[in-house]
Amino acid sequence: MHKGKGMKFVGDSRISSDRKPNMPKDYSEYPGRTEAFWPNFLLKEWLVGAVFLVGFLCLVLAHPSPLEGVADPTNATYIPLPDWYFLFLYELLKYDFASGPYTLFGIIILPGLAFGGLLLAPFLDRGPGRRPHQRPIAVAMMVLGLASVMLLTWESASHVDWEARAEANKPVPTTEIDKENPGYAVFESNCMTCHGDSLQGGAAAPSLIGIDYSKEEIMKIAQEGIGTMPAGVFKGTDKELEALAEFIVSVNEEAK
């Protein structure tokens, strides 16, 4: 070191440099305003996500979604519905400005503008504040998008009888059919056209598996009809009618 107008320092390579680990910045000077992304902020995000996931799993276990039967391409009366998280788009396509000749506008342009706006919200409103009133553009776009989705979903779901739909389209139980049974020959000549070769039902008639009718009730229905089934469908003798009823009852007893 030389004295004078300035000082000169000479380094010594034999002295190891004191390297400090890469520590996050100390934000204690700004309490409540900001924090380190790792691990403080990211840990909070993980905890919130874990709580939501566990709650959602518990809800699914407590109230499982009603399942419908296997898709039947011959059933022209079936009305398909999207899953609940797409019901708002399903409802949107019912309006005149998003259906018919304007379907492209409803399925691509409108959703694209909505989700594109939400994606660009952080870039359109770049204010430093974190409170809602300090981010008016981003908050307004988020509230508008969320309110629109909730309103359209509610409007669509309110017009659907979910219990009746689940009951009408519930999975059909299957069982092995004894085609050597005398009653099956009677069923084949009188009922197979509508109810299928395995009693599974079809577009014109429901399944005969899983029904809770006695032998006498089945004989009466075969002669007098029920619902959309007209009277006089069965053509046969009393002995054949009894064999048919016994066959259907035996199939349902095996299916239980």
Image: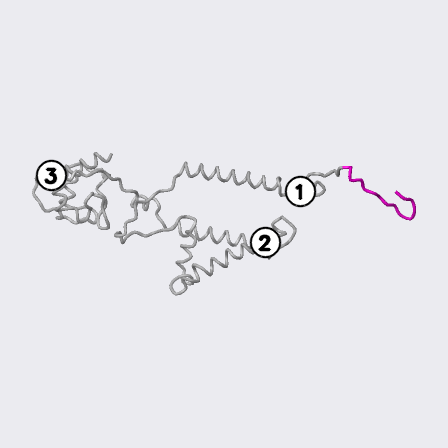
Q: Which residue is disc 1 drawn over?
A: 32
Circle 3: is it few (<14), some (14-19), or many (20+) Cα within 10 Å? some
Residue at x 62%, y 51% (from the top left corner): 133
Q: Which residue is disc 2 drawn over?
A: 122
Q: Which residue is disc 3 drawn over?
A: 182
* Identity, as a three-letter code, of the amino acid under mark 1: Gly
In-front residue for pair 100/185 = 185
> Is residue 86 highlighted in magenta?
no
Q: Quadrant of residue 175?
A: top left
* Identity, as a three-letter code, of the amino acid under mark 3: Pro
Residue at x 51%, y 54% (from the top left corner): 145
Main SS type for the magenta part?
loop
* Identity, as a three-letter code, of the amino acid under mark 2: Pro
N-terminal of the pair, mark 3 or mark 2, is: 2
Circle 1: is it few (<14), some (14-19), or many (20+) Cα within 10 Å? few
In-front residue for pair 13/138 = 13
N-terminal of the pair, mark 3 or mark 1, is: 1
Q: Secondary structure at mark 3?
A: helix
The answer to whether 102 is drawn above or below residue 4 in the figure is: below
Residue at x 88%, y 45% (from the top left corner): 7
Label drawn at residue 96:
none
Q: Secondary structure at mark 2?
A: helix
Colour scheme in use: one colour
Q: Which residues are magenta?
A: 1-15
Q: Secondary structure at mark 1?
A: loop
Taking 27 as reference, is 244 left or right? left
> Is residue 13 highlighted in magenta?
yes
Residue at x 65%, y 51% (from the top left corner): 128
Taking 36 as reference, is 10 left or right? right
